[in-house]
């Protein structure tokens, strides 16, 4: 059974919270392999010790990728999502470190129907947070959603 919500089911101001997940060494390594980003700040522990952070940082783009997994885990878009429409005003507020346990908070923003009226457009305010409440990334992600099936 699906937990999907459709355009009409969402209300501006609603907040959804994902389950948490801990970022591992394997996550960093696999993302380096997939992206081809082997910057020393991510993969060279000795170099990273000499930086203002004192340790390796997880790729910022991995945070965005993890958010897409959190969408799946909350389940509300399983059968209703049509398209990710964009990422706006994205900010990297604090570094993500190996061992950080993260979760996503998603707040529903403005909503409107498409010009054809056959789907909904919805703004989502996204906050990726550490276990201690620190916001590590935040911004907006627009989505196109199915309308509720008639019947």
Image (cartoon, rainbow, N blue to C red):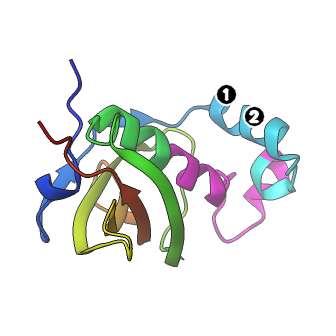
Tag count in the figure?
2
Q: Residue at label 2?
A: 29
Find the magenta span and give its range. Answer: 43-66
Q: Position of residue 58 (x, y in %)?
A: 64, 50
Q: Which mark is residue 26?
A: 1
Q: Nearer the viewer, residue 98 or 29?
A: 29
Magenta includes 90? no
Q: Residues within 10 Å of mark 1 (few under 14, many from 20)?
A: few
Quarter residue 145 falls in: bottom left
- The answer to whether the residue labelled 1 contacts the one labelled 2, judged by CB atoms less than 8 Å apart, is yes
Q: Secondary structure at mark 2?
A: helix
Where does the image place residue 117, in percent across and percent down from the top left? Answer: 31, 68
88 lies left or right of 103: right
Left/right of residue 113 with respect to residue 46 in the rendered view? left
Task: Quadrant for the C terminus, please.
Answer: top left
Give me the residue at 39% from left, 47% from top: 81
- Residue 125 occupies quadrant: bottom left
Residue at the image point whose x is 74% and y is 32% from the top: 30
Residue toward you, 14 or 91: 14
- Residue shown at 11%/64% (left/top)? 11
């Amino acid at each position: 059974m699906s937990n999907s919500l459709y355009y009409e089911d969402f209300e501006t101001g609603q907040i959804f919270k994902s389950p948490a997940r801990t970022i591992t060494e394997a996550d960093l390594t696999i993302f380096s392999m997939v992206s081809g980003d082997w910057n020393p700040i991510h993969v060279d522990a000795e170099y990273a010790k000499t930086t203002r952070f004192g340790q390796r940082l997880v790729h910022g783009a991995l945070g965005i990728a993890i958010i897409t997994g959190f969408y799946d885990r909350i389940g509300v878009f399983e059968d209703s999502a049509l398209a990710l429409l964009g990422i706006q005003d994205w900010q990297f507020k604090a570094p993500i470190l190996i061992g950080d346990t993260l979760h996503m908070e998603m707040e529903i923003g403005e909503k409107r129907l498409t010009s054809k009226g056959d789907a909904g457009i919805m703004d989502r305010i996204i906050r990726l947070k550490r276990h201690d409440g620190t916001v590590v990334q935040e911004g907006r992600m627009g989505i196109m959603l199915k309308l509720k099936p008639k019947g």
